[in-house]
Amino acid sequence: MQITYYGHASFLVQTQGKKLLFDPFISPNELAGSIDVDAIKPDYILLSHGHQDHVADVERIYKTSQPQVISSFEVVSWFEEKGLDNYHPMNLGGEWQFDFGKLKMVNAVHSSSLPDGSHGGNPAGFVITNEEATFYYAGDTALTWDMKLIAEEFSLDFAFLPVGNNFTMGINDASVAAEFVKTKKVIGMHYDTFPYIKIDHDEARETFNKKGLELILMGIGETTNI
Ligand code: NI
Ligand code: MN
């Protein structure tokens, strides 16, 4: 499984011959200026919720490869009205077998409105399982006891967790979340983009290390294999 970081909460996961793009907020992100948004050409765009810092580049990228947009019914319907006709609506607790693996939409404790103020339904996270790996993309969320349910059902290889604090859980809660979902390998997201969510990288890694956990803070544009 190959993972490329595009800044903030946006990652490209290449697995089973498919390109899955999560929460694209790339062209408005000054830290991600080196990324060629139009060259990504994903097969799928997965949206955890409707906030601008997660959906900003959806319409632009849609024009390049018509990826299927997977999100809550409300978020998908909003993009449908904008003319995107390749989509898959879901809601919390639902599972679907896609050609890249099985996806379950799981709880996130956050809010969800679209950029024009429209109601975005409930925010969500995703658990994806296929022959290569099983991973959890938490989206924007607080630490929640519900994360223990993920460990009961799945054996995770790694998780994408927000660590930036203020709008989502911070480092300490994220390290507890890693324990709740029972994974030792965490890829951090939702940090440094805005002044409110700047973090000390060394201190963050150290917090995880002390618990026997690994926190990976990828460079923007960096690709890694898991
Ligand atoms: Ni948000
Ligand atoms: Mn956000």
Image (spheres, helix red, strand yellow):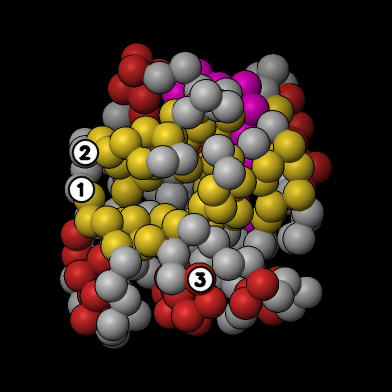
Q: Mark 1 points at which residue?
A: 91
Amino acid found under the numbered disc labelled 2: Gly
Q: In this view, does 158 lie above or below 114?
A: above
Q: Mark 3 points at which residue?
A: 65
Residue 135 tag number:
none
Callouts 1 and 2 close, C-beta under 8 Å: yes
Q: In which quarter of the image is residue 224?
A: top right
Callouts 3 and 1 close, C-beta under 8 Å: no
Q: Is residue 185 above or below residue 44?
A: above
Q: Residue at x 27, y 38 (%)?
A: 96
Q: In this view, does 226 lie above or below 31?
A: above
Quadrant where the N terminus sits is top right
Left or right of residue 114: residue 171:
right
The x, y position of residue 126, in whole percent, is: 39, 41
Element carrying mark 2: loop
Decide which of 216, 163 is in the foreground and name it.
Answer: 216
Magenta residues, as a range?
Answer: 180-191
Q: Residue at x 43, y 71 (%)?
A: 66
Quadrant where the C terminus sits is top right
- Residue 189 among magenta residues: yes
The CA span between labels 3 and 2 is: 26 Å
- Residue 109 among magenta residues: no
Left or right of residue 50: residue 27:
right
Within 10 Å of disc 2 (Cα), the crowding (few <14, some 14-19, many 20+) is few
Within 10 Å of disc 3 (Cα), the crowding (few <14, some 14-19, many 20+) is some
Left or right of residue 224: residue 23:
left
Q: Name the residue under label 2.
A: 94
Element carrying mark 3: helix
Amino acid found under the numbered disc labelled 3: Ser
- Precedes in sequence: disc 3 or disc 1: 3
Choose mark 3 or mark 1, whichever is in front.
Answer: 3
